[in-house]
Image (cartoon, helix red, strand yellow):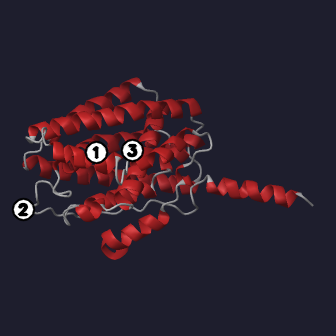
Amino acid sequence: MNAPATVKPNAKRHRKLATPPGMIPEVRRPNFELPADMPRYWWDNDPAKTLLLAALSSGFPPGERFFIDSVRYYQDRITDPELQQAIRGFIGQEAHHSREHKALNGFLEDRGINLGRLEREIQVFMDWMRNNLSPERQLAHTVAVEHFTALMAEEFLLKYDALDEMDPHMAPIWAWHAIEESEHKAVAFDVYKTVGGSEFVRATEMLFVSVVFPVFTTVHLVQLMKADGQLGNFRSWGKALNYMWGKPGVFRKLLPSYLKFYSPRFHPWNNDARDLVEKAKRKWLKGGA
């Protein structure tokens, strides 16, 4: 008599902690065109905010290739057809992110923003991890960074007005990337759990990422601001810091979702942003696809 009442809550809780059925990342092949007269500071006419995204973009080509390889290493161990399909979608999306950001970095490089050196530094770091970390820890690194990027995509680029503040030629690139980061945010995690990845490794790798990611980004932003003659632009620094940590404080507001990663009950889809993503698709993707 009491069995159904016991089973239902558990089943419901299990669904909440899992990737929604049919959530297969869609591989898009966008063709972005950036005009020669693009404003130098294309986000809110602000050096610090613009160069922050430029610094992040410099790491995407080597980073996305690393993520692909870490997931692909375990691909033949996955027997679930839907997860296999999701892996293929993940690889396709990440490959196109690497390609488009390589093109974006080249565009910015031609305009005097030295992202090539930054990209090479990150490539050296990725190569070090390939040579020194176990496949399990490499996949855990991908899981951790994917959580970071999904939070930034959903709670930063898609929820607030950052995209509306960007040049209309630049905004679709970041909107597309943010949408796809949300779509595939659980693929590496689901692979990691399926192959029996350690919770200790997952948590400690996030601690590592939580130091390395901000340090790389901050150092590279300082380097770009200095090279652009903006290091002493305290108004720009203050405006960016207020935006990230004051009001609206988009990074500050990420902290609760970030901390949930350390729970053994964590799943990326605990933060279900599908409504937000669908709204962004209609606004930023051609045909709303």
Which secondary structure, mark 1? helix
Of badges 2 and 1, the one in the foreground is 1
What residue is disc 3 on?
68
- Residue extending farthest to the bottom is 287
> Residue 21: x percent and y percent?
58, 62
What residue is disc 2 on?
37
Of badges 1 and 3, the one in the foreground is 1
| Marks 2 and 1, the one that precedes in the sequence | 2
| Marks 1 and 3, the one that precedes in the sequence | 3
Residue kind at label 3, given as amino acid type: Ile
Which secondary structure, mark 3? helix
What residue is disc 1 on?
241
Residue kind at label 1, given as amino acid type: Leu
Question: In this rendering, would 112 be left or right of 269?
Answer: left
Q: Residue placed at 49% from the left, 55% from the top?
A: 86
Residue 289 visible in rendering: no
Of residues 32 and 277, which is closer to you in this image? 277
